[in-house]
Image (spheres, rainbow, N blue to C red):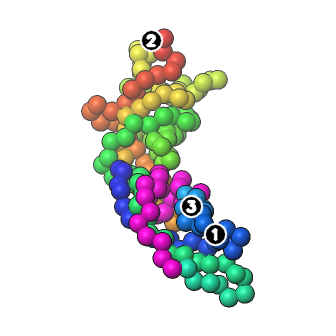
Amino acid sequence: MFFHIVLERNMQLHPRHFGRDLRDKLVAKLMKDVEGTCSGRHGFIVAITGIENVGKGLIRDGTGFVTFPVKYQCVVFRPFKGEILEAVVTMVNKMGFFAEAGPVQIFVSNHLIPDDMEFQSGDMPNYTTSDGSVKIQKESEVRLKIIGTRVDATEIFCIGTIKDDFLGVISDPGSTS
């Protein structure tokens, strides 16, 4: 799920940033460029926790830009098959529902929703049990299990299920409690 790892990146800096606060400008640019991005290999970069090393700069011919190798520590979020997550439902339709757990989007097919829940269309589509005691709708919090992941260069997609013990709705925004 969350890992603390060391990564390296080459950062280009314009000559106007050279001066006493060169390192601060470099770190600020690194945070702006890297935090919130997704690397298929490592996962979503949540936060940079420290800078280990800033190497010697290499001047780019013709432009004046300088490339610095920067080694940094960061926290990454990488979901795995079999992992249990808590997520917020973002969209419900007859095919299933989409939920988000931090930056990752998870699809739960209607085949992976318990059999006693049925789709109800209308102004607020939802999945409801026959007695109406449990309802999955937009903004509901659910606990789900990831049963599959697909990793692209810049995104991670997951398939989940709530058809297992101790999985399902945690809180329902429609309930009056």
At label 3, which amino acid type do we have? Asp
Residue with the mark numbered 3: 24
Residue name at image x 47 percent, y 52 percent: 47
Q: Is residue 37 magenta?
A: yes
Whole-percent x and y of residue 156?
48, 56
Disc number for residue 177: 2
Residue name at image x 44 percent, y 63 percent: 51
At label 2, which amino acid type do we have? Ser
Q: Of marks 3 and 1, which one's residue comes earlier in the chain?
A: 1
Tell whether 62 sits left or right of 129: right
Q: Marks 3 and 1, how far apart in space?
A: 10 Å
As drawn, which residue projects farthest toward the front? Answer: 20
Q: Marks 2 and 3, how far apart in space?
A: 49 Å
Whole-percent x and y of residue 137?
52, 27
Residue with the mark numbered 1: 19
Q: Of marks 1 and 2, which one's residue comes earlier in the chain?
A: 1
Q: Residue 107 or 100: which is nearer the viewer?
A: 100
For the residues labelled 2 and 3, say whether their Cβ atoms are less than 8 Å apart: no
Residue span colored magenta: 32-56
Q: Is residue 63 above or below residue 95?
A: below
Is residue 147 visible from the viewing direction of this image?
Answer: no
Q: Marks 1 and 2, how far apart in space?
A: 58 Å
At label 1, which amino acid type do we have? Gly
As drawn, which residue projects farthest toward the top? Answer: 176
